[in-house]
């Protein structure tokens, strides 16, 4: 399974929803809290092609996007193959 990284904030409901989906699927992920580690926010913005909102989710080197994007992949049956590739 590819490494998963998720940039989050503890105040973000979409972050909690994305993490809940990953947890339900048994996916191990690295959480980067941009409030706890503010120096990571510019890194997130650069990696996410300018997107500034959290969550920003990466599977391996693939930028998935935010919570809605993650759920869309799941609904389309594309999340599991992406994780396994």
Image (cartoon, grey):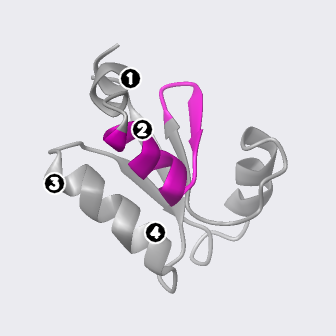
Give the mark, 4 or 3, whose residue is nearer the N terminus: 4
- Identify the residue at the far top of this view: 85
Give the mark, 2 or 1, whose residue is nearer the N terminus: 2
Q: In percent of the image, x 81 and y 44: which residue is there?
A: 46
Residue underneath mark 2: 73
Q: Is residue 73 magenta?
A: yes
Report the mark closest to the observer, 3 or 2. 2
Q: Is residue 30 above or below residue 81?
A: below
Report the mark closest to the observer, 2 or 1. 2
Q: Position of residue 4 (x, y in %)?
A: 40, 38
Query: Do callouts 2 and 4 mark residues in contact (Cβ within 8 Å)?
Result: no
Element carrying mark 1: helix
Residue underneath mark 3: 24
Residue underneath mark 4: 15
Give the mark, 3 or 1, whose residue is nearer the N terminus: 3
Q: Is residue 84 above or below residue 4?
A: above
Element carrying mark 4: helix
Query: Do callouts 2 and 1 mark residues in contact (Cβ within 8 Å)?
Result: yes
Label 1 Cα neighbours within 10 Å, binned few <14 / some 14-19 / many ≥20: some
Q: CA distance from mark 2 to mark 1?
A: 9 Å
Task: Specify start and end residues of the magenta stretch as a single range.
Answer: 59-75
Label 4 Cα neighbours within 10 Å, binned few <14 / some 14-19 / many ≥20: many
Q: In percent of the image, x 77 and y 62: which residue is there?
A: 52
Residue 40 location, quadrant: bottom right
Give the mark, 2 or 4, whose residue is nearer the N terminus: 4
In this view, the residue in front, 83 or 42, is 83
Report the mark closest to the observer, 2 or 4. 2
Q: Is residue 7 above or below residue 82?
A: below
Q: In percent of the image, x 54 and y 75: which residue is there?
A: 9
Residue underneath mark 1: 82
Give the mark, 1 or 4, whose residue is nearer the N terminus: 4
């Amino acid at each position: 399974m590819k490494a998963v990284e998720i940039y989050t904030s503890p105040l973000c409901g979409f972050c909690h929803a994305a993490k809940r989906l990953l947890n339900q699927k048994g996916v191990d992920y690295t959480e980067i809290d941009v409030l706890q580690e503010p120096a990571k926010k510019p890194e997130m913005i650069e990696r996410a092609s300018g997107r500034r909102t959290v969550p920003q989710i990466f599977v391996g080197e693939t930028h998935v996007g935010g919570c809605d994007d993650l759920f869309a992949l799941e609904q389309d049956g594309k999340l599991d193959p992406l994780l396994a590739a």
